[in-house]
Amino acid sequence: FLRWGVLSKTGILPGVYGDEMMALREAVVPYLQRALANRRAARVQGSEEAALAGRRREDRVCDYAWVLISTILGRPVALPEDPVYRDPQIREFDLWLSRRR
């Protein structure tokens, strides 16, 4: 997932794929929204520092999708360290996106 980007507490530093998704703007949102339900671990390879931070935060596919969509839509995001606190925010965000259509 390093090619998607590196997650931080306040957003994402996009990688190659992240930049491409950001360039597609709202056209990519429906595809990323499907990933909001994917709780699979997002393995980061390449940067040892990014990999350690991702393991410490237990980054998942849904976290990347949430942060990317939020960034594309210009919505602020605060990424809690513990996934237990991220899950309710991701569910609420998914509902908001569904109502928005």
Image (cartoon, helix red, strand yellow):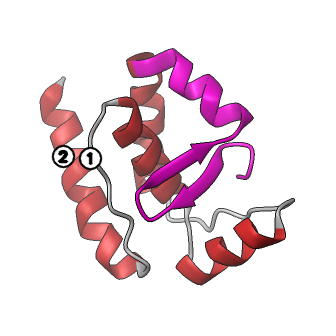
Query: The residue tagged with tag 2: helix, strand or loop?
Result: helix
Q: Residue at x 64, y 75 (%)?
A: 53
Q: Is residue 86 left or right of residue 44?
A: left
Q: Residue 4, labelled with which disc?
A: none
Residue 52 located left or right of residue 84: right
- Which portion, as a residue range, is magenta? 1-25
Residue at screen point 73% across, 33% down: 16
**Label 1 residue SS:** helix
Structural distance between the alpha carbons of marks 2 and 1: 4 Å
* Residue 88 locus on image (x, y percent): 24, 68
Question: Quarter of the image containing the C terminus?
Answer: top left
Query: Type of residue at label 1?
Result: Asp
Q: Nearer the viewer, residue 94 or 23?
A: 23
Marks 2 & 1, CB-CB < 8 Å contact:
yes
Verify whether residue 90 appears in magenta.
no
Q: Which quadrant of the structure image shows residue 89?
A: bottom left
Callout 2 amino acid: Leu
As drawn, the residue found furthest toward the left would be: 99
Q: Which residue is mark 2?
A: 95
Outermost residue, right side: 46
Report x, y in % for residue 68. Answer: 46, 41
Q: How many marks do you count on the picture?
A: 2
- Give the image location of residue 85, x and y in percent: 30, 77
Q: Position of residue 43 (x, y in %)?
A: 72, 64
Q: In the drawing, does residue 60 fall left or right of residue 46?
A: left
Residue for point 16% across, 42% down: 96
Which residue does the numbered mark 1 point to in the structure image?
94
Inspect the magenta stretch and tell me whether residue 18 lies in it: yes
Residue, x 41% and y 55% (percent of image)? Answer: 37
